[in-house]
Image: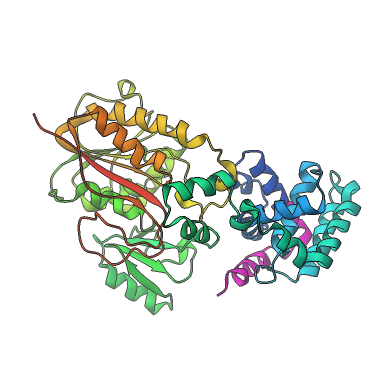
Amino acid sequence: MKQNDTIHAQTMQGQSAPLWRLLQSTAAAVQATRQGRSLTAQLESVPAELRPGVQALSFQVLRHLGRATALRQCLASKTPPPAVDALLCSALALCWSDAEAVYPIHTLVNQAVEAVRQQRSTQAQSGFVNACLRRFMREREALVKQTDADVQAQWNHPAWWVERLQADHPLHWQTLLALAQTPAPMTLRVNTRHQSVAEYKKKLDDLGVSSQAVGEQGLQLGKALPVHQLPGFSEGHVSVQDAAAQLAAPLLMQGLDNKAKWRILDACAAPGGKTGHLLELCPKAEVVALDVDASRCERIHQNLRRLGVQGQVMAADAGQPAQWWNGQLFDAILLDAPCTASGIVRRHPDVRWLRRPTDSGQLAKTQAMLLKALWPLLKPGGRMLYCTCSVFKAEGDETVQAFLQRNTEAQLRPSPGHLIPGQPPAGLPVDHNPLGEHDGFYYALLEKRQG
């Protein structure tokens, strides 16, 4: 199914309401993103019956907001009020290209104008929006061509983001930007304590669901499914987890006896996918899972209960061990550090517009602080896996190299480093199937020298 066909099908779920209502909520999501609020949080305020359609349209708009903003600047050099600008840019993002349009362009234009008219805060500007969109329809080819030289319009990312990828990944920056415009696949992690990957794939095949093996325990689906349609999901037979994230637990535990009672810290654990994976691989391990947010800790509890495994979950700040650590050293530590999430922009297209150029540097300081705070909690001979879902080197390789320079007892074991979607990763512990369309990630496995 083509991407625009999928979006159209999702918007039809909200068709008990007219399209103009979906466009109003979509524009509100765009305006919230511009004001620094995440799309996930904004969608929670959308009525449940409209949410699938609004989410689909919002993803499409945010993936083309750079082009839309440049087009709006051509049509009206003075920025309209925020709500009007959000509606106008949403319409332009949805109809700038025939290939990308999810509805006939004249329908989108008519419904966008109606959305402006039906909203008290914007109705006075309905004539302005109508004039802009009618002109766009008449001069579309010329206006699009006029914006082609604009970096933000061309790549639909902030110019600083494009420049940073060019510097960090000179061979792959175009691939990263192009992939960000396409929906990420749904990937499952099979709980091999219950069945093999091949056995679970057979169950999917029997349901007519196509899949391909990725990594040691993964299956990438040909089409996303609601989790309640996955065989055995509620019984913990399978979890939803990107192929890159599935590497964390095997990398940390490579070469260790999975029947031993290892003491393991998952330092930034919510929502608990990696915690559950560790316990699937090492069911006798004593795993301590931390998250600073108590409400997110409940998500960890829910995941562990579904998988039928037990771990110690604590609401605590990993950077303040004095407040929660009992003094007993850990054999292994997983530090999935806070980051810009630049590697998962396919799944969260609002991230590119929420981040600022200074965010990587500020987050790198947090990452360095966490490494410094947690390293003393590791036994001599123990290992720490540092990872982020970022493709920016300031949050990956640069952070780790700086840590190694300051800590002579730390040594870097074979590690994948920065994982680029679509590129076969190196530094993995065992041979495996290609990871497919995995997220962008960074992994560094650190070992504490003995003596």
Q: How many marks do you count on the picture?
A: 0
Query: Is 377 placed above or below 300 here?
Result: above
Residue at the extreme left:
451
Residue at the spot 77% in from the left edge and 65% down from the top edge: 142
Quarter of the view holding residue 186: bottom left
| Left/right of residue 312 with respect to residue 148 in the rendered view | left
Q: Residue at x 62, y 49 (%)?
A: 43
Instruction: Residue lying at the far top in this picture: please name it.
Output: 322
User: Does the segment drawn in magenta span residue 15?
Assistant: yes
**Looking at the picture, does residue 191 appear above or below residue 299?**
below
Q: Quadrant of the N terminus?
A: bottom right
Residue 243 figure quarter: bottom left
**Considering depth in this image, is 276 or 433 the residue closer to the camera?**
433
What x and y, as percent, mark residue 346?
51, 56
x then y, percent, for residue 230: 42, 66
Occupied quadrant, residue 298? top left
- Identify the main secondary structure in magenta: helix
Q: Is residue 22 visible?
A: no
- Which portion, as a residue range, is magenta? 1-25
Residue visible at 43% across and 57% down in the picture: 172
> Which residue is at 50% across, 61% downward?
179
Drawn side of residue 34 relative to residue 190, left or right: right
Q: Position of residue 300 (x, y in %)?
A: 39, 43
Instruction: Report if residue 38 lies within the magenta region.
Output: no
Q: Name the quarter where the C terminus is drawn.
A: top left
Instruction: Let me know if residue 263 appears in the view.
Output: yes
Q: Where 303 sits versus 321, above or below?
A: below
Q: Nearer the viewer, residue 91 or 410?
A: 410
Where in the figure is residue 133, as x and y percent of width and height? 82, 60
